[in-house]
Image: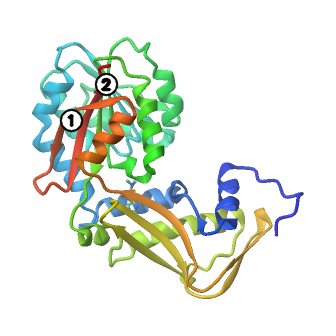
Amino acid sequence: MQDKSTVLTSAFEQEVYDGLTAQPKYLSSKYFYDEIGDKLFQDIMAMPEYYLTDSEFSILDRHKEKIASIFNFDKEPFSLFELGAGDGKKTKILLRHFSEKDIDFDYRPIDISQNALDQLEASVTKELPNVEINTLQGTYFETLANIGESHAKRKVILFLGSNIGNLLHPQAISFLQSMQEVLNDDDLIFMGFDQKKNPQTILDAYNDKTGITEAFNKNVLTRINTEMNGNFDLDKFLHWEVYDPETGTAKSYLVSKENQTVYIKSLDLEVNFKAWETIHTEISQKYDDEVVTWLANEAGLQIENQFSDEHEFYKNYIFKKKIQ
Ligand code: AVI
């Protein structure tokens, strides 16, 4: 066990300590992402089973004209903020269309990674030279707070990829609330929500036969091994996915295949696993209109419009501040 002299130096260390000493054990999916995890997530998005990316791509392509007319309803200049822009592949559909239609806007992607922003800026400047891009480095919450209500132009905030699905409902509501707080009356939020559907389609998306999702899930253990001097044997854990069609919650686990003890040196922590004991690592929530309406309402927002792909697998909703 950890003695009193061991100092936990980062939020990651503290959360690993808390999660692996809890009953049942858990680790946060935010720690899947490092250079290897980012690449694995890119690979997931390119998998045929992971329908979310193609669905959102198709929505943006099919409805770009209508989306442009809503974003640009008053023909006044606006700023298009994007939270967690990544490589901007989907967003470029809108950027290209807005640029071709001579819509007056500037693009303000927000990301924690300066490297991701530099790459995005370089590719947008090359492919879409008429688009004005101003990158903002920081966490969503810091940067949103800084944008504030004082931003001179009207704001449209994009949050794509159903990233909200990695939050439990109470966290999703406070996240939406923190966005709502920076909105003026004419500002908009455009957000992706993966929908409830045939449970098998969902299980296939999170449990591909090629093992990419398994490697992604296990990357949190790899990170503990490299960053905290741990000795997890990845082969002694199963990737396991469950989906509850009633609540719409997909959950990922790592399941210990045998009785084993893992030692994490930086935490001076010995973790005992019984055979078939679980570590819960991620939720990927699936939604329907009722739940999205409820979340929005709780956060002081209302749905203005919604767009769906042809299979109704996925929806993008436009929110505004609720009229009191
Ligand atoms: C980033 N996030 C929305 C993905 C999802 O679908 O929950 C992460 C992911 N996990 C497994 N596959 C993809």
Q: Nearer the viewer, residue 135 or 231?
A: 231
Q: Is residue 69 left or right of residue 248?
A: left
Q: Which residue lies under the disc numbered 2?
A: 322
Q: Is residue 1 left or right of residue 281?
A: right
Q: Nearer the viewer, residue 196 or 46?
A: 196
Q: Is residue 27 left or right of residue 192?
A: right
- Is the residue under label 1 in contact with that under label 2 (CB below 8 Å)? no
Q: Which residue lies under the disc numbered 1?
A: 94
| Placement of the C terminus among the 4 image quadrants | top left
Q: Is residue 182 left or right of residue 312?
A: right
Q: Tell which circle, 2 or 1, labels the residue nearer the N-terminal end.
A: 1
Rendered residue at 52%/70% (across/down): 218
Query: Compared with residue 312, is residue 218 higher up or lower down, i.e. above or below?
Result: below
| Secondary structure at numbered mark 1 | helix
Distance (Cα) linking label 2 and label 1:
26 Å
Rendered residue at 15%/54% (across/down): 312
Classify residue 260 by image quadrant.
bottom right
Q: Amino acid at mark 2?
A: Lys
x then y, percent, for residue 77: 25, 15
x then y, percent, for residue 323: 29, 20
Query: Compared with residue 319, is residue 291 higher up or lower down, i.e. above or below?
Result: below
State yes or no: Cβ of the residue under disc 2 lies below 8 Å from any atom of ligand 1: no
x then y, percent, for residue 91: 27, 39
Q: Amino acid at mark 1?
A: Leu
Query: Compared with residue 117, is residue 289 higher up or lower down, i.e. above or below?
Result: below
